[in-house]
Amino acid sequence: MKTRIAIVTMLLGLFFAGTAFAGEPVPAMKAEATKAVSEFLQDEIDYPAFATETNKECTVYVDILVNADGTLNVNEANGKLGCLKDHVVTAIEDAKSKDLAKYAGQNVVLKIDFKLYE
């Protein structure tokens, strides 16, 4: 009898430990959120005049959090040129869309290319 109780206790312990440490599933809407944010930001971020005048090109990677009110927060931004990185961060944080509110809480990572000649 003691053996059965010990086995049942061990199995329950394994079950609870397994569910407690299980990773959260990736939301099905992550790809959809990335696409929606990317399409929205294509109209919001323009090639800055100071960069075209000085022939500056750069790729900026941004990690964005979508808020419940449709605003966007930049968690991290990385790029070679600080001026273009700052331009991207400012443009993203100034942008707002009520359509993006349905993706609240989603993190989106985007690559934004500034290329003069392709």
Image (cartoon, grey):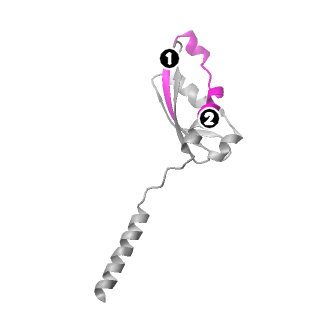
N-terminal of the two: label 1 or label 2? 1
**Residue 71's x, y, as percent?**
65, 40
Residue at image x 54%, y 39%?
108
What is the crowding at mark 2: few (fewer than 14 residues within 10 Å), some, or many (at least 20)? few
The numbered mark at residue 57 is: 1
Report the number of numbered marks: 2
Q: Is mark 2 on a helix, strand or loop?
A: helix
Q: In which quarter of the image is the N terminus?
A: bottom left
In the picture, residue 52 is in which quadrant?
Answer: top right
What is the crowding at mark 1: few (fewer than 14 residues within 10 Å), some, or many (at least 20)? some
Above or below residue 98? Residue 48 is above
Above or below residue 22? Residue 2 is below
Left or right of residue 83, residue 98 in this image: right
Q: Which amino acid does label 2 sit on?
A: Glu
Left or right of residue 4, residue 76 in this image: right
Residue at image x 58%, y 25%?
87
Residue 57, magenta (yes or no): yes
The numbered mark at residue 14 is: none
In the foreground, 110 or 86: 110
In the picture, residue 93 is in which quadrant?
Answer: top right
- Which residue is most to the left? 3
Residue 107, magenta (yes or no): no
Left or right of residue 99, residue 117 in this image: left
Q: What residue type is labelled 1?
A: Glu
The numbered mark at residue 93 is: 2
**Residue 7's x, y, as percent?**
32, 79
Q: What element carries label 1?
A: loop
**Residue 103's x, y, as percent?**
62, 45
Q: How far apart are marks 1 and 2 (CA)?
A: 22 Å
Left or right of residue 83, residue 43 in this image: right
User: What's drawn in magenta, residue-wise?
Assistant: 37-62
Above or below residue 68? Residue 61 is above
